[in-house]
Image: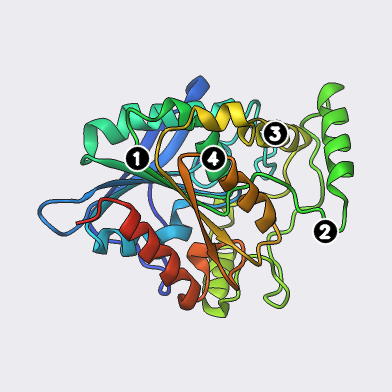
Amino acid sequence: MIEATLRESEDNPVPGNHTVGYFTGDRGKQLRYAIFRASRQVARGTVVLLHGRNECIEKYFETVGDLTAMGFWVATFDTRGQGGSERLLKKPGAGHVRRFSDYQRDISLFLEQVVLPDTRLPFFMIAHSTGALAALAAAPGLSNRIDRLALCSPFIELDSQQSVPSSVIRAVATALSLVGLGRVQLGKDQRERDFDGNPLTSDARRFKRNLSLHRQFPELFIGAPTARWVYEALKTMGRVVRQDHLTNITIPTLILAPMLDTITPYKAQEELSRNFRAAQLLPITGARHELLHERDVFRKQALAAIDAFFAPE
């Protein structure tokens, strides 16, 4: 586990007025967190920011700066097993989880140990990709703490157009998990990719900045997921889109769906919104999976929608 500090670089400075430390997650795991305070005297509330797989607090410095400029405090933490949080296996680069419910429990413990005592009401949540899947899974139990929820590119279905069919991925992950080989990684570690044709963002500058993070601070990042991680994620995907689960979510929810998303198909996000009474869908035409790291023309749409949806003044 690395020291409770935030890494910065010339093109990715740490936002000011912050606190960083560790809290104790489910089963005693030490998870790195940070709180960033708005400069205005009376805050509009606190945004709990949940990351996607293989992300870290540092990747969201720009977004944190935007949110604090809106008048919000931001409370965020590195998901167990990645970023500056404690790893789960002896091989630190493996993306693993024992149960997906561990993520849900970590969210509750973060709220109890850090957000409730140390930040400002009311509480809102922004969750991206796998973080959005965890937020959806936890949402029925969060209605007394979270006022509004924004889901960016929720990871609720595998894209059927990828090189390995989703049915094959599901079968392999399930078989390995059930025979005790859940720690086997599925695929090779890919810490760098070319900008051309990448599925994450059409913004070359932000792509380069995030790639620089990987190169400068490799200890914050992980490689391919394990069979167990994939198995648990797939089970959770199947559960959170069921009508009986969605009916139990009463938190007003905004789904921000990039229409060129090839990680989670746009049609799956659209279908989710149709069955989700508490939710509304905002399609972002032309955007790819990482909305908060996209070009300004897309990113500003997302941030403006979130600003209007959270605590309108």
Q: Secondary structure at mark 1?
A: strand
Quadrant occupied by the C terminus: bottom left
The residue singled out by tag 1 in the image is: 21
Q: Position of residue 170 (x, y in %)?
A: 83, 38
Provide the residue designation for mark 2.
161
For marks 4 and 3 on the same chain, the one whose residue lies earlier in the sequence: 3
> Which sits in the foreground, 155 or 100?
155
Disc 3 to disc 2, C-alpha distance: 19 Å
Dots 1, 3 in contact, CB < 8 A: no
206 up-or-down from 261: above or below: below
Amino acid type at circle 1 is Gly
Callouts 4 and 3 close, C-beta under 8 Å = no
Helix, strand or loop for disc 4: loop
Image coordinates of residue 167 in percent, x first then y, are 87, 42
What residue sits 59% from the left and 40% below the top? 275
Residue 238, disc: 3
Local packing at callout 3 (Cα closer than 10 Å; few below 14, some 14-19, many 20+) is few
